Amino acid sequence: MTTPQTRRSKTATLDLSAVSAALWLAGTVFVALVVLYFVGLDQGATSIFGSDTHVHEFVHDARHLLGFPCH
């Protein structure tokens, strides 16, 4: 009689090293700060796009929903 071959499960391993965690944290903080800038601070004199208000108008309702005053 032959023995059945065992199947290898294809499970992904999770890398929990400190370097990997630090890179994920740094990336998450960067993205969060960019979103915070565009939703909460990109207006008028602080706009990186000059006097263009397209970004402000695009996120206008989100600004009010999150409690940022804009006018």
Image (spheres, rainbow, N blue to C red):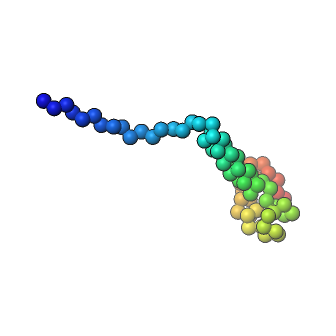
Quadrant housing the N terminus: top left
Q: Position of residue 13 (x, y in %)?
A: 47, 38
At a point 63% along the width and 44% down the height, the residue shown is 24
Seen in the picture, residue 36 relative to 1 is either above or below; the reply is below
Determine whether, in the image, residue 41 is placed left or right of residue 62: right
Which of 44/62 is in front? 44
At a point 74% along the width and 67% down the height, the residue shown is 54
Seen in the picture, residue 20 relative to 37 is either above or below; the reply is above
Visible in this render: residue 65? no
At a point 72% along the width and 56% down the height, the residue shown is 61
Visible in this render: residue 22? yes
Determine whether, in the image, residue 1 is placed left or right of residue 33: left
Quadrant housing the C terminus: bottom right
Which of 4/28 is in front? 4
- Residue at the farthest left position: 1
Q: For residue 53, what is the image quadrant?
A: bottom right
Seen in the picture, residue 12 relative to 42 is either above or below; the reply is above
Q: For residue 56, what is the image quadrant?
A: bottom right
Which of 59/61 is in front? 59
* Number of numbered discs: 0
Seen in the picture, residue 45 relative to 15 is either above or below; the reply is below
Q: Position of residue 63 (x, y in %)?
A: 75, 54
Determine whether, in the image, residue 42 is placed left or right of residue 13: right
Q: Position of residue 15 (x, y in %)?
A: 54, 38
At a point 71% along the width and 53% down the height, the residue shown is 35
